[in-house]
Amino acid sequence: MKLSNETIDVLKNFSNINQNLLVKKGSQLRTMSTMKNILAEVNVNEIMPREFGIYDLSEFLGVLTLAQDPELEFNHDSYLTVNGGSTKISYFYSDPSILVTPPDNFNEPETDVEFAVTKASMTKVQKASAVMQLPDIIFTGTSQGVTMTVTDKKNSTSNMFQESFDNTGSTEGAFQFDFKIENLKIMPDDYSVTVSTEALVSCWKAVNKKVVYWIALEQPSD
């Protein structure tokens, strides 16, 4: 089996959420942050022939770069083999019991607010957060549109960066949702976002990819 570039990109993204990964048999990959405030899932083109655990996903991705055009074989119960050119690597599975993994069943809460976020807008606010060292992002919705504000909620004199767009595809009415920017570890794409105001959980569905994230909100600002 050869992993596509798209699947490699997904695994790189998942490694930012959690270094552990339990790969289940089939085509769905799922991960959850150690704080249990981010859950991500995606259907990839490859069909995994067995369940196996990876303790350090970044290390695993690095191992794949050691072989030319790497191909994975799953002929052993305790390890997989990476073949490429003259290179052969044995990479041992991790015991699933020591991994932080998502629950088998996730009861999705009912959502009552919807809005869209473009790749370009998200890229701008993530860059602003990094440049200005601001940890919080606040989504504010009005009848005129949606504004993303990057700030530091704990600092009353914090610098701010704002990005606004119209309310096309958004729920009518006012809303405000607060996130830690470090929790928005999403792949670059346009997103349809729905929010459960009761559960304080958001669902981010990529428009052009098959990935979905469930991300917890912070308590709203006073």
Image (cartoon, rainbow, N blue to C red):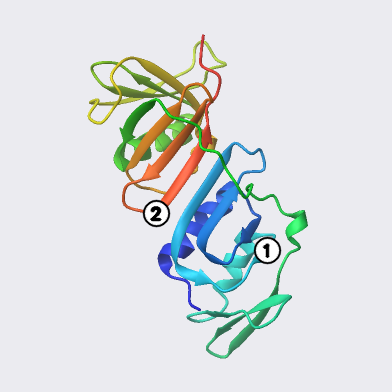
Query: Where does the image place residue 202, in percent across and percent down from the top left?
Result: 47, 32
Kindly indicate the quadrant of the structure image that contains residue 93: bottom right
Residue 222 rendering spot, x and y as whole percentages: 51, 8
Q: Which SS class for mark 2?
A: loop
Of label 1 and label 2, which has the lower sequence position? Answer: 1
Counting the numbered discs, the total is 2
Instruction: Say which of 25 and 183 sits in front.
Output: 25
Which mark, by number, is residue 131? none
Query: The residue tagged with tag 1: helix, strand or loop?
Result: strand
Q: What amino acid is at disc 1? A: Gly
Q: Position of residue 18 (x, y in %)?
A: 62, 49
| Residue at 66% over, 55% down | 20
* Residue bearing mark 1: 53
* Residue holding disc 2: 210
Left or right of 101, for residue 160: left
Q: Taking 115 as reference, is 17 above or below it?
A: below
Residue 210: which quarter of the image? bottom left
Residue at the spot x=51%, y=59% of the render? 28
Residue 46 visible, this orientation:
yes
Q: Is residue 90 above or below residue 133?
A: below
